[in-house]
């Protein structure tokens, strides 16, 4: 007689279990033996040895250094491309627009004060008064006036509703450094990065001057000059 086949318990009344080659043994539910379920054992996670861990650390450090260098290269390329675009626009404005029209545009269309125009292009207010009376600037200063007009155009393209107001505003509300001062210092790319929201205000300040937290206190204020245009003056 063939011995009863012991099987795990399942629902139903009868079970068909293989007994031998070509044979099947029927087992009733009352004959089935119930075995407790034991989950399969899993292998313990492998612990890397000290040498392998050191190799991983060195490799990750190397990748991090490469990413840092790539980011630096991207930053340089971006700055050069943005500067080229600004210079190209300035050159076209300089060649296509009469100087008197450029001055009128800065004041009447964009809303910059005459003193701010003088500061932006690096001349005295008296020089601007001579230009308004019909005087011609030297080529370099004419180009600076065209560059200022080009910058205001790019600020408008960045979504700035009032480009002149943006230039006259502080980089951030708790410092005295204004965007116009950043531009005058030859950092037009930082002004554009802030306008296009490519960089936060603190990043712009860090790149402009790492000592900005102690150097730039509120020493200037915004006021409306005699021409009815907003300007900056020392408190």
Image (tube, rainbow, N blue to C red):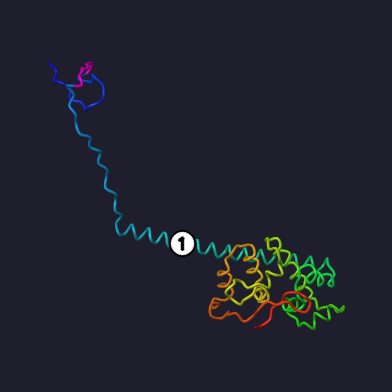
Percent x, y for residue 163? 71, 67
Magenta stretch holds residue 25 = yes
The outermost residue toward the left is 1
Q: Which residue is mark 1?
A: 64
**In the image shown, does 115 or 83 lie closer to the viewer?**
115
The image quadrant of residue 19 is top left
Percent x, y for residue 43? 27, 45
Highlighted range, magenta: 21-29
The image quadrant of residue 197 is bottom right
Q: Is residue 64 left or right of residue 226?
A: left
The C terminus - image quarter: bottom right
The image quadrant of residue 232 is bottom right
Percent x, y for residue 229? 75, 74
Please give the count of numbered marks on the rendered protein. Answer: 1
Most frequent secondary structure within the magenta stretch: strand
Magenta stretch holds residue 56 = no
SS at badge 1: helix
Q: Residue at x 68, y 67 (%)?
A: 83
The N terminus - image quarter: top left
Q: Is residue 65 left or right of residue 57?
A: right
Q: Residue at x 70, y 60 (%)?
A: 157
The outermost residue toward the right is 134
Percent x, y for residue 144? 75, 74
Q: Is residue 214 left or right of residue 49?
A: right
* Residue 96 against residue 30 in the figure, above or below: below
Within 10 angstroms of label 1, few (less than 14), some, or many (20 or more) residues?
few
């Amino acid at each position: 007689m063939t011995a009863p086949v012991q099987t795990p318990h399942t629902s139903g009344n009868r079970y068909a279990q293989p007994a031998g080659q070509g044979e099947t043994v029927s087992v009733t539910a009352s004959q089935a033996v119930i075995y407790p379920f034991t989950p399969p054992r899993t292998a313990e996670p492998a612990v890397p040895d000290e040498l392998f861990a050191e190799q991983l650390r060195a490799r990750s450090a190397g990748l991090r250094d490469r990413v840092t260098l790539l980011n630096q290269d991207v930053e340089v390329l971006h700055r050069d491309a943005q500067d080229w675009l600004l210079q190209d626009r300035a050159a076209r404005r300089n060649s296509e627009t009469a100087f008197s029209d450029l001055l009128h545009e800065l004041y009447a269309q964009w809303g910059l004060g005459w003193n701010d125009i003088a500061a932006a292009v690096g001349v005295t207010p008296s020089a601007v008064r001579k230009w308004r009376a019909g005087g011609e600037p030297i080529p370099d200063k004419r180009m600076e006036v065209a560059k200022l007009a080009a910058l205001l155009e790019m600020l408008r393209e960045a979504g700035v509703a009032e480009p002149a107001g943006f230039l006259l505003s502080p980089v951030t509300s708790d410092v005295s450094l204004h965007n116009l001062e950043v531009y005058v210092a030859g950092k037009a790319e930082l002004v554009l990065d802030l306008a296009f929201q490519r960089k936060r205000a603190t990043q712009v300040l860090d790149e402009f001057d790492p000592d900005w937290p102690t150097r730039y206190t509120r020493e200037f204020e915004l006021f409306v000059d005699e021409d009815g245009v907003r300007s900056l003056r020392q408190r």
